[in-house]
Image (cartoon, grey):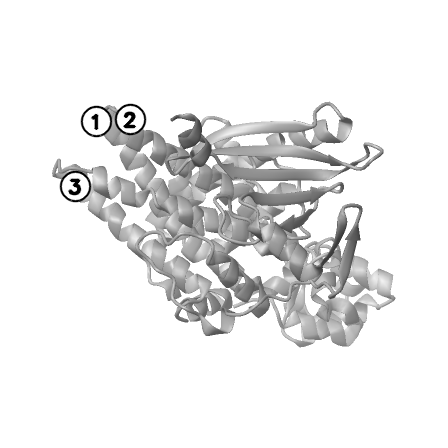
């Protein structure tokens, strides 16, 4: 199989496709390529010719190193280099990028071509392509400025993989190291991927049961309520996986594309289950949403989980495990203990020293202040003036606040459809237009008051936003007497 180095592609893309390039490039002078932060930042913007020019590395040395290792050059090869290449190493025309190919599918949809026809052609061309490559191409489209709503349409296109290539033997689809890594982690009892994969297995069985009941006209109420437990599964993805990929690993694709689909599925399941009608139109809606849930299972198992497996560190998995303990069990899967994940996390920025903290109202030791805040019968979140999550009190919460979100941009912790609302509230607090925004809501059959408050100093300078969640059932009972 030919190994083609397209000199128009970024260093990051080339090393991702051919990991052995990292050592080759380091030998010729790209010494910082072994630093993950440099590869994931500068490497995404830098081509080999441009990098060689900045480093003062002659292109003849660079290309010679590549050719001697069996690579074929493509793209914009300098004339002085190209004319000296052996005949069997002449630069071939650069192949069309995955992003360019995907743009063609989007263009066809935009011109009104039926989705089914586009999907059929997609399966023919991408039948043996790793599904994670599609996700990476989606991210490239976003970096190029393609609107999010257009990229989200690719979910409808690449869901065809579930009906086509997904039915083949995994080895035939060229699954790589990240899939092997994901399978290894999913085999560890209690590991987060073990729990999430187990939830998907049960969910898949329930979907099949619902279809069988629908076909035989049996009662669906119980099975549909069980399937709706997927909301907790999606919440864990949204709180623990998407933001970590986006903020810490520079992979925004899942949070931008899959998170929105999660919300759409959750909303449609709720609407279908609450609908009083059970006519043909209702059955069609049910079949459609069950198919979307099933396709999301495929995308998680074949795209999301392998991406997480390839990028998350051992400490990050341990923190995910600890944060996941705060979620209710769902889909009849009770998370097993993972001994390696037990104990306290050591996330950067969360350490504090013992001693008294002096305030205008008194002085407390750190343990006293911590216990005091945790004893309050409310859930507290504080976002500072730079929109960074700085503090959550501990304990079980109705609205989950994973410890990993500390020191992270508050907007990245909300699904795309909610972010404009959060920005508007904080914007009003910052400008002084509002000081408080109360929101009454029902959740799990209980009434809650969620109050957002501007935190200001004595000079009325904005310092941040406080969110307080109060269970109002006791107040209802008291005043309802």
State which tag comes first along the sequence, 2 or 3: 3
- Residue shown at 44%/45% (left/top)? 158
Residue 393 screen position, x and y as percent? 60, 51
> Is residue 164 shown to the viewer in this render?
yes
From this view, report whether residue 460 is shown above or below residue 23: above
Work out how far the residue at label 2 is from the one at label 3, CA to CA, in angstroms. Answer: 18 Å
Residue 177 screen position, x and y as percent? 50, 68
Residue 192 screen position, x and y as percent? 45, 62
State which tag comes first along the sequence, 1 or 3: 3
**Contact (CB < 8 A) between labels 2 and 3?**
no
Task: Assess disc 3: are there few (<14), some (14-19) or many (≥20) residues with their C-alpha within 10 Å of its C-alpha.
Answer: some
In this view of the protein, which residue sits in the foreground, 16 or 459?
A: 459
Dot 1 lies on which element? Answer: loop
Task: Assess disc 2: are there few (<14), some (14-19) or many (≥20) residues with their C-alpha within 10 Å of its C-alpha.
Answer: few
**Contact (CB < 8 A) between labels 2 and 1?**
yes
Disc 2 versus disc 3: nearer the observer:
2
Q: Which mark is residue 302?
A: none
From this view, report whether residue 478 is shown above or below residue 164: above
In this view of the protein, which residue sits in the foreground, 368 or 242?
A: 368
Work out how far the residue at label 2 is from the one at label 1, CA to CA, in angstroms. Answer: 8 Å
Q: How many marks?
A: 3
Q: Which mark is residue 278?
A: 1
Residue named by callout 2? 275
Residue named by callout 3? 213
Dot 2 lies on which element? Answer: loop
- Residue shown at 29%/51% (left/top)? 204
- Residue shown at 78%/72% (left/top)? 31
Q: Which quadrant does the C terminus fall into?
A: top left
From this view, report whether residue 440 is shown above or below residue 301: above
Disc 2 versus disc 1: nearer the observer:
2
């Amino acid at each position: 199989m030919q190994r083609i180095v397209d000199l128009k592609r970024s260093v990051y893309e080339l090393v991702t496709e051919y990991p052995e390039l990292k050592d080759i490039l380091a030998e010729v002078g790209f010494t910082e390529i072994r630093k993950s932060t440099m590869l994931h930042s500068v490497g995404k913007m830098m081509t080999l010719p441009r990098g060689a020019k900045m480093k003062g590395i002659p292109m003849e040395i660079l290309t010679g190193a590549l050719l001697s290792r069996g690579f074929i050059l493509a793209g914009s090869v300098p004339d002085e280099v190209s004319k000296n290449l052996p005949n069997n190493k002449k630069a071939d025309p650069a192949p069309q990028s995955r992003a360019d190919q995907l743009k063609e599918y989007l263009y066809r949809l935009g011109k009104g071509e039926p989705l089914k026809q586009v999907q059929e052609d997609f399966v023919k061309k991408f039948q043996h392509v790793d599904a994670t490559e599609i996700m990476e191409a989606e991210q490239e489209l976003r970096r190029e400025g393609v609107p999010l709503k257009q990229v989200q349409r690719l979910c409808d296109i690449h869901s065809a993989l579930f009906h086509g290539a997904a039915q083949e033997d995994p080895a035939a689809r060229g699954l790589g190291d990240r899939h092997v890594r994901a399978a290894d982690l999913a085999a560890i009892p209690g590991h987060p991927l073990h729990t999430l994969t187990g939830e998907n297995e049960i969910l898949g069985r329930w979907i099949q049961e619902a279809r069988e009941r629908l076909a035989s006209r049996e009662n669906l109420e119980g099975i549909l309520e069980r399937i709706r437990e997927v909301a907790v599964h999606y919440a864990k993805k949204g709180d623990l996986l998407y933001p970590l990929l986006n903020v810490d690993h520079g992979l925004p694709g899942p949070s931008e594309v899959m998170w929105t689909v999660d919300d759409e599925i959750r909303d449609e399941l709720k609407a279908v289950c609450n609908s009083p009608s059970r006519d043909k139109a209702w059955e069609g809606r049910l079949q459609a949403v069950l198919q979307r849930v099933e396709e999301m299972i495929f995308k998680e198992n074949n795209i999301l989980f392998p991406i997480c497996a390839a990028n998350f560190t051992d400490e990050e998995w341990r923190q995910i495990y600890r944060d996941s303990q705060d979620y209710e069990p769902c889909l009849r899967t009770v998370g097993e203990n993972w001994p390696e994940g037990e104990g306290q996390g050591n996330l950067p920025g969360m350490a504090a020293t013992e001693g008294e903290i002096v305030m205008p109202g008194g002085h407390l030791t750190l343990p006293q202040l911590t216990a005091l805040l945790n004893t309050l019968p409310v859930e507290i979140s504080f976002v500072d003036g730079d929109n960074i999550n700085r503090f959550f009190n501990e304990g079980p919460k109705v609205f989950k606040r994973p410890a990993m979100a500390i020191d992270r941009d508050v907007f990245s912790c909300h699904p795309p459809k909610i972010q404009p609302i959060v920005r508007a509230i904080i914007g009003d607090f910052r400008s002084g237009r509002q000081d408080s925004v109360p929101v009454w809501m029902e959740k799990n059959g209980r009434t809650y008051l969620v109050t957002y408050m501007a935190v200001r100093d004595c000079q009325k300078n904005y310092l941040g936003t406080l969110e307080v969640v109060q269970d109002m059932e006791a107040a209802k009972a008291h005043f309802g007497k």
